[in-house]
Image: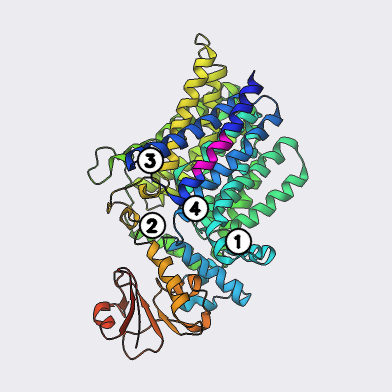
Amino acid sequence: MYKRRLMIIAITTYLLLIPLVTYFKYFPRIVNSEITNVFIFLLVFLLTLLLVYGTFLTGKSTDVYLLLPQSLIFIFIARAVPNLRLSYPPLHDPYYHYICTLNILRYGTLKPILDWWYGGVDIQLHWPDMHLLTTALVHITNTGTMQIFRFQEPVMGIMFFLAVFVLAKVVTKNEGMAMMSALFASLSDVVIFYQSEYHPQGFAIVLLILLLYTFIKSRSVNDIRFRYVTLIFCIVFTLSHYFTPLFLALIFGMYLMVLLIIRALSSYSPIEDKFYEIIEDIRLDYTFLMVIIISALAYHFMVYTSVVMGFIRIIFTEQPLQGQLISIGQSNVPLLTSILCVSKWGLFILAIISILWIIKTKNTNEFRLAVLFVSIIVAGIIGNYVIISPLDRLIGFYVPFAAVFGSLTLFRFGDEWFNGIQKNRKVMVAVLIASILMTAGFFNSQTPAYFFQDSSVNTFYWYSNDLSSIDMYGATGKWIKVYTPIDSLYITEFDTMMLPLYYAEGSLNNIMRITTPQGKLGGYIVMNPGIPYYYRGKDFDKRSYLSSINILYDNGVLILGDR
């Protein structure tokens, strides 16, 4: 019976993916905006619910393959929504990082040749994993760089799903739990956001999960090959992002201290009967932890010290972020966003239940993940109330571990706990809870305008929840390609340099960045009058400057002219 249900779910989820990708690609209106909004919400919810229910139906390990392809496609779509909706990535960070990749692609070196365009090239190229991966993909696949720029990180979302799956499987020994863990982690709003844009943060999380998987696997099977792979991932992870390895070094340092404290206490308290054996089993973790800590810190302090010194300066000079734990009731936060953000507490509560249940299970691998989970939470508390810290990234770090424990809680609820309640009812409650939390993560990953018709403009959101102005960049680039000679000289700002380079497919040799508002500049001038421009610390009057040139193109957002 379960096999037949699983087959029906597999077929249905394949069919649901078709309208899902069609909607985000063409954004059609069905009757009116209200009906369309309800349609896309129910479509995502139904797809999520069926995939989650399918995890409870997996019996043999081969059953996973009936759900895995649809799950991977769904995870990819969740991250590709901005690029399906728009031809122009709206935030600046992807372009910052792509300039670094362009430095490697064009000049074949990690030396910051393009730092005249983006001053952070020197910093970023000291942590070049993502940029080197893009370079390799461009040369190997012969795919257009713009397409890799737009879709490489959504593909990393697929790798993230698989990484969480194998990590959860080695901890839970259950394919269904592993599938749900991967869905929980992959549909987290913070993780989706960072893996939807060209940013090394999303890539670094993938490497972290693979690092932990190979480490735990090496302890489970006592295979020296996994230890070598763990060391390789340790090196690669250290070179993934200028912030992430440094932060994780501090987290693992806290992790190490917690283990040492527990081991010391276990000799003098009743905890010895329950956890002494676990503590003895993980005493070899200390070497692994020290390798990670020393590797990350040594690279920062010995190779590129300015970053870590900058963090230290911020700690002593800046106030904590004081992020709101619950946003409902805050006048500046839209109600929809408040509700979706509160859903994060659902996974957290589910995770805490199974972390406390370790007292009974005494599972060594669960204990490892629990200590790491608690260490990240403590770091989040410190970052919220004591020193400044990027709280959204802390959530991204703890989500994979919370996903494993949250899945354990729901499966234990369905299979082991409350035996007086009919199992089918318990499973449906668990499926409903998980589906609601995952759907909330999907819709909270981007601003509402990406998902819903006629979503009102609101300055609370990035770019005021207005996608129409963003699309003007792609349209302007296409106009430049058609109506200006290919060998023209283009005078641009940082914000407009991508237009003749990416969208008009011009040569970098023919593009200049405005370095002075004075004098007569030849060629075509491309500006965004709405973005302030500063020259030597003073405001530059763009409107006055543009009034002195011949305007050839003006779409209300961007202007192109010549002398």
State the residue lying farthest toward the front: 31
The nearer-to-camera label among 4 and 3 is 3
The one nearer the camera, 540 or 212, is: 540
Residue kind at label 1, given as amino acid type: Asp
Q: Are marks 4 and 3 in contact (CB under 8 Å)?
A: no
Label number found at residue 315: 2
The nearer-to-camera label among 2 and 1 is 1
**What residue did someone put label 1 on?**
129
Q: Position of residue 214 (x, y in %)?
A: 68, 44
Sequence-wise, which precedes: disc 2 or disc 1? Answer: 1
The nearer-to-camera label among 2 and 3 is 3
**What residue did someone put label 4 on?**
196
Residue 509 left/right relative to 325: right
Label number found at residue 36: 3
Q: Position of residue 307 (x, y in %)?
A: 48, 64
Residue kind at label 3, given as amino acid type: Thr
Q: Secondary structure at mark 1?
A: helix
User: Per the image, is 462 magenta?
Assistant: no
Q: CA distance from mark 4 to mark 3?
A: 24 Å
Residue kind at label 4, given as amino acid type: Ser
Q: CA distance from mark 3 to mark 1?
A: 41 Å
Up-down: is 544 above or below 476? below
